[in-house]
Image (cartoon, rainbow, N blue to C red):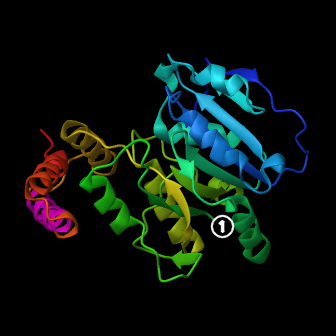
Amino acid sequence: MKNYRTLLKLRSQSGLSRDERIAVCVRVKNEASELPRFIDSLKKQKMFESIHLIFLDSGSSDDTVSILQNLNCDLYSIHSSEFSFGDSCNLMMSLSDSELNVFFSGHVILEEDCFFQRIFKLFEQIGEFSGYFRQIVNEYLGYSIYDSTFLKYYFPRYNGQSPVLLKKGFHFSNAGSVISRKQWKEIGFEDVVASEDQIFAEEVSAKFDGIYYFPDLNVKHSHNESPESITKRVKINVLAKNPNGVPAYKYYFSFLKLFLSLFINSFEFKDSLKFAKAHSEGYIIK
C-alpha cells in the first residue's frame, strides 16, 4: 500500500468495542443525494450498534462530508489525486482491525435487516471467508434494460440456496461484499484503475477454494448510465484486466450476446441495439 500524504481523520466513532468483529467500509465522493437512504438502511441492520463504521471521502464538493459528520463513524478523507480503486481498498482494510470487513457503495440500499447476522453466523461455522451479496435495481436512482438484464444475469437466485460456494462464474463486487482480513493479508488488492474487486476474488478463489455468494441478501444498486458512460466504464475495466487490448472478435461476440440477452428480457429492439453497441464499443482499444 502506498503512503497517503493527504490522509486526514475528520471524526472518530465513539462507544466502539475493542473486540470488534465486523467493520463496514465505504468509499464516497459526492454521494449526498443518495447517502441518507444508504445510512437509513444501515441503521436498520441487526447488530448495527456493534459495527465499526469507516468512511473514506476522496474530494466531495457536495454535502457528503457534512452528512457523515453527523453519523457516529470513523470518517477519513484523502485528496482526489491520491484515489485509486484498488489501493483505496487496501487503505480501508488498514483502517480496520475487524476480522470481517463489509464493503458497500455509498449509494446502495440494503433490502434485508440481517446482513451482519448472516455473515457472522457463517464466520462462526467455517472461519475465514470472503463473499458478496446479490444486487438488484435501485428504483430511486432509476435503471435501464441494461441494468436490469446485467443484474439478473450476474446475480441469480440459486433456487433458495444461500450462501452458495462458487469456484468460478462469480461476479464479485465491492458495491456489496465481505472480505476476510486473513485472506486480504495474504493477497491484497492490486493497484489497478478498475476491476480490483473481481481480480481480488479470482485470486482468493484460487488460493482458498472459492467465494461465497448470498443470493438472499439484496443490495439495491443501479446507475441508469448513458450509452457514453457505459462505453467509458467498460473500456476502463477491459484495460484493467487486458492492458494490451483484446482480440477484435470479442467486440462482435459481446455485441451479439448482449443484444440477444437485452432483447429477450425486454422486447425493446431500439434500446437493446443501443446498449449492446455502447457496451461492445468498450472492447475497442485505439
Q: Nearer the viewer, residue 224 or 83?
A: 224
Q: Is residue 16 above or below residue 176?
A: above
Instruction: Evaluate whether residue 117 shows in this view.
Output: yes
**Residue occupying the point 75% across, 33% down:** 73
Q: Which residues are magenta?
A: 249-263
The percent position of residue 99, horizontal first and vertical second, equals 76, 56
Q: Magenta stretch: dominant SS?
A: helix
Residue in the image at 50% along x and 29% along y: 33
- Residue type, label 1: Phe
Residue 76 lies, in percent from the top left, at 67, 26
Query: In the image, residue 206 lies at what x, y percent?
Result: 50, 70
Q: Residues within 10 Å of mark 1 (few under 14, many from 20)?
A: many
Q: Quadrant of residue 95?
A: top right
Task: Report whether residue 127 is seen.
Answer: no
Q: Residue 161: x percent and y percent?
A: 55, 82
Towards the viewer: 70 or 201: 70
The residue labelled by disc 1 is 129
Q: Is residue 60 above or below residue 103?
A: above
Q: Element under label 1?
A: loop
* Residue 267 falls within the magenta-colored stretch: no
Q: Quadrant of the N terminus?
A: top right
Task: Look at the image and tell me in which quarter the C terminus lies.
Answer: top left
Tell me: 262 left or right of 52: left
